[in-house]
Amino acid sequence: MTTQRIALVTGANKGIGREIARQLAQAGVFVLIGARDPGRANAVVDEFARQGLQAAALHIDLNDPAGIAAAADTIRTRYGRLDILVNNAGIVDAGDGPPSTASVDGARRIMDTNFIGTLAVTQAMLPLLRASTAARIVNLSSSLGSLALNGDPASPYYSARLIGYNASKAALNMLTVQLAEELRGTSVVVNSVSPGYVKTDLTGHNGFITPEEGAAVPVKFALLGEDAVSGRFVEAAGTTPW
């Protein structure tokens, strides 16, 4: 088995996920490009290869439990362990909005992918992460998932009432808190990281920062050393309130 660190980045075929994968590869990590579309994942692998970066495509769909199990089996067979899991994949829905008017089906779709799907991937990968001497889980959250900021009229996020998306990220933060406590004393470290308002397809390219800038903090927490902290919610400016 290789001594090179192995990372899985979900939703790594575009946007911030692809940039997180690139920066991890630039740091010497072998990156698995997790994506629903094998063609798009292979295109990223080819792009990275032209840049001298090591990566491989991995088919994974957060809404396909059997496929998630198969992805974990593939990693186990080929590499024997997983050192880094970046839970980046997520969706928005056009029907999302304030609690009084949001599409219930839209909110359900968001929760099924952003929270339930991430939980399923994390559970499937945990045995592989436990096999690492220093595993790192990074959950891509958002300041929109902060209950404190959602309830603060002075916050710039106060008016962003997207019950489905915001609730999905708050739930993801709960996963971070509970999993970090459950894994306390093990080699697995878990944190929620808000990349900021990034210009990607997810935001309609209306963000304030580039994917390169947004990837910096998630990559930093994916590469934490022996003094790694766990169970935190952070962004570029520092700690984010829960």
Image (tube, rainbow, N blue to C red):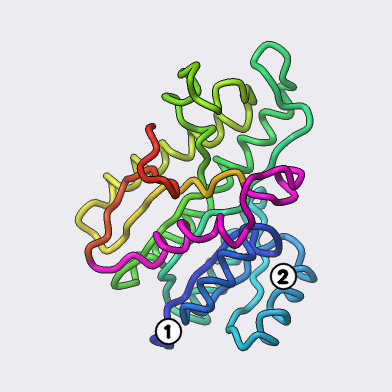
Which residue has dot 1 on it?
4
Q: Residue 194 location in percent, x, y? A: 49, 45
Residue situated in front as seen by the camera: 139 or 175: 139
The percent position of residue 59, horizontal first and vertical second, equals 67, 66
Left or right of residue 64, residue 201 in this image: right
Q: Residue at x 49, y 70 (%)?
A: 7
How far apart, in angstroms, are the residues tagged by discs 1 and 2? 21 Å
Residue at numbered disc 2: 41
Q: Do residues under tags 1 and 2 come within 8 Å of each other at their CB atoms?
A: no
Q: Residue at x 29, y 51 (%)?
A: 230
Camera-side residue of 120 and 14: 14
Does 199 sit above or below residue 241? below
Work out whether 150 lies above or below 4: above
Q: Amino acid at mark 2?
A: Ala
- Callout 1 amino acid: Gln
Q: Is residue 54 magenta-colored?
A: no
Rendering coords of residue 132 (x, y %): 34, 72
* Between 167 and 218, the one nearer to me in the picture: 218
Q: Quadrant of the C terminus?
A: top left
Residue 231 percent across, percent down from the top left: 32, 46
Q: Main secondary structure of the magenta part?
A: loop
**Which comes before the other along the chain, label 1 or label 2?**
1
Give, as a single range, the part of the protein colored magenta: 198-226
Label 2: element kind = helix
Q: Residues within 10 Å of mark 2 (few under 14, many from 20)?
A: many
Q: Quadrant of the N terminus?
A: bottom left
Q: Is residue 224 magenta?
A: yes
Q: Residue at x 66, y 52 (%)?
A: 64
